[in-house]
Amino acid sequence: MRLRKKPWIETAMEELKDKYVLMHNLEQYKGHWQERFPGKRLCLEIGCGKGRFLTGMAELNPDKAFIGVETQHDISYYPGKYIMDNKLDNAVVICANAENLEDWFEQGEIKELYLNFSDPWPKARHAKRRLTHRNFLAKYQRLLGSGGHLRFKTDNRGLFDFSVEEFKEFGLEIIALSYDLHHSEYENAVQTEYEQKFSALGTPINFCEVVFK
């Protein structure tokens, strides 16, 4: 999602940088996230947008720490501001490209990964850019290690079918799958901005949860 650039955000971000929104020298956190979130299970959301899901999950799960990754500078302001204003001590945003995840996290440091309404990259030649492509799955496997969970939600059926096949081919254990999450028995306590929008239009939400072996 791209927003019209707001000139005031650059100044406002100064209050958030390096505390609520991390942007620089991210390699320094590798292997040290437990120092920031002592005793908390680390959860990662790639593409957190304005942060409704990230902050909602942090509020519901104080025993866990939620780290959101958002590439767009202006958008990363919103979850950072919410985290600051609501004094959430178990959430933070990284404003950077998720391709560099392995520079920021040690192997096995993340325990849960969330992919919510990722860019579908519909053209076949762009398949490797999809966040559920096997190349990304290999990266996630190193970050999460054996027993790590990946939870994936999307309104895009084409992307969902592609993703499920990638999960199977990669040898992941599928423990939950629904083509209509909101009418299933699976827990869905926090919805993203996109999810609320699409669901209100009657679009079914696809959901899959897998475990790395």
Image (cartoon, helix red, strand yellow):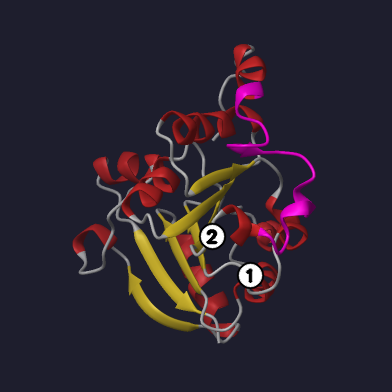
Badge 1 is on which residue? 140
Residue 87 location (% of width, % of height): 43, 36
**Which residue is more in the foreground, 176 or 78?**
78
- Mark 1: which amino acid? Tyr
Residue shown at the point (28%, 46%) measured from the top left: 199
Badge 2 is on which residue? 38
Query: Within the magenta stretch, is there residue 44?
Result: no
User: Which of labels 2 and 1 is toward the front?
Assistant: 2
Residue 92 location (% of width, % of height): 55, 44
Position of residue 141 relative to residue 171, above or below, is above
Res 95 quadrant in image: top right
Q: Secondary structure at mark 1?
A: helix
For residue 37, side relative to residue 203 (left or right): right
**Which residue is more in the foreground, 60 or 68?**
60
- Mark 2: which amino acid? Pro
**Which residue is more in the foreground, 90 or 72?**
90
Residue shown at the point (37%, 65%) measured from the top left: 207
Sequence-wise first label, 2 or 1: 2
For residue 46, side relative to residue 95 (left or right): left
- Camera sees residue 130: no
Q: Secondary structure at mark 2?
A: loop
- Camera sees residue 40: yes
Q: Which residues are magenta?
A: 14-32
Residue 133 location (% of width, % of height): 63, 68
Q: CA distance from mark 2 to mark 1?
A: 22 Å
Res 31 quadrant in image: bottom right
Residue shown at the point (80%, 45%) measured from the top left: 25
Mark 2 Cα shell of 10 Å, populated few (<14), some (14-19), many (≥20): some
* Placement of the N terminus among the 4 image quadrants: top right
* Placement of the C terminus among the 4 image quadrants: bottom right
Residue shown at the point (64%, 55%) measured from the top left: 123
Position of residue 213 relative to residue 47, above or below, is below
